[in-house]
Image (cartoon, rainbow, N blue to C red):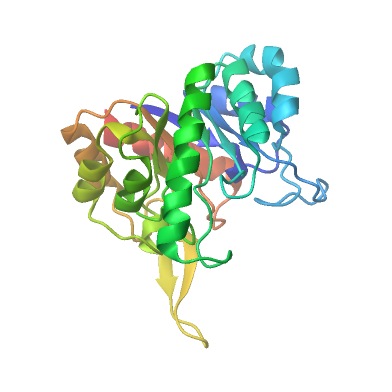
Amino acid sequence: MKLGVFTVSMPDYEPLEAATVLKKLGYDGVEWRCTTDTGDRSKPSFWSGNRTSMTAAEIIQRSPELKATGLAMPSLGSYIAIDSCTFEDAELHMRATAAIGAKNLRISAGQYGRQPGKFWDLFKKARENYAKLADLAAKHNVRAVIETHMGQLGPSAFKARAILEGLNPKHVGIMWDPANQTYEGSETYKMALDIAGEYLAEVHAKNACWLPGDKGWRYESAPLRTGIVNWPEIIQCLEAIGYDDWIIFEDFSTEVPLLDRLKDNLAWFRELTR
């Protein structure tokens, strides 16, 4: 399996610095954080002021220097959603994906509970929109993928696949994130992979835990080795279906310094996948 890092989880670095660090550590590739980030970059955090952030237009402009790093770039982690972006914007992001030789582009199927409408109406609209996205993706030879993500219309592999069912898996797919599914959309690992089937496009690796608090249980990030998600079992399940594609880390734990967790995550998964 090939191992990379989603740069949302390494906010301290400028893009070329991030690529240099990952290559030196021995990672195979990088997934770029693709968004407009107006936060204070002198105080970078995961989701605001993240120094690795680039817009789709910036990625197109910088594609020659990004490709010159020698790192594989399998995907873009965009923050656009099919219920709120225009198809022109989606196509711009697809152009950026193609410009760096990537295949996968994350496009959310839309939020649930933050927009008016009942689930089945929103679901039907998402299917219609993703059918149009599949045609656009085919034009650019890329793949629009739904991440299993809490709070969205596709929090489980089953719901994500239901949105995509019948569309060409060469141009749409599922970004499977089992840590997100500990919050919403829980399925056993074997079942999730069985459901995703040929739509499985990428695996996101992080971990999480539930902790008691004054106002009830709270969901928090955890180191890959110690959270709820059983990564050794997941690797076994992936091997059982012959998966040999990308696992992309997005570790939001902060117990140890960033560089140390980048090193340890890679070392552990090299042991698990050898």
Indicate the position of residue 45 as horizontal and vertical percent values. 70, 52
Q: Compare residues 57 and 73 and report the one nearer the observer.
A: 57
Instruction: Name the image quarter holding residue 270.
Output: top left
**Is 2 drawn above or below residue 225 in the view shown?**
above
Image quarter in which the N terminus is found: top left
Residue at the image point whose x is 54% and y is 28% from the top: 30
Residue at the image point whose x is 72% and y is 34% from the top: 55
Q: Compare residues 202 and 122 and report the one nearer the observer.
A: 122
Image quarter in which the C terminus is found: top left
Indicate the position of residue 126 as horizontal and vertical percent values. 47, 48
Residue at the image point whose x is 31% and y is 40% from the top: 165
Residue at the image point whose x is 63% and y is 49% from the top: 84
User: Left or right: where does residue 166 sit relative to residue 112?
Assistant: left
Q: Is residue 269 visible?
A: yes
Residue extending furthest toward the bottom: 214
Q: Compare residues 96 and 190 and report the one nearer the observer.
A: 96
User: Left or right: where does residue 117 sit relative to residue 8?
Assistant: left
User: Left or right: where does residue 250 sit relative to residue 69?
Assistant: left
Q: Count every numbered label the image shows and give the total.
A: 0
Indicate the position of residue 254 as horizontal and vertical percent values. 57, 56
Q: Is residue 100 visible?
A: no
**Is 28 drawn above or below residue 89 in the view shown?**
above
Indicate the position of residue 221 as horizontal and vertical percent values. 49, 60
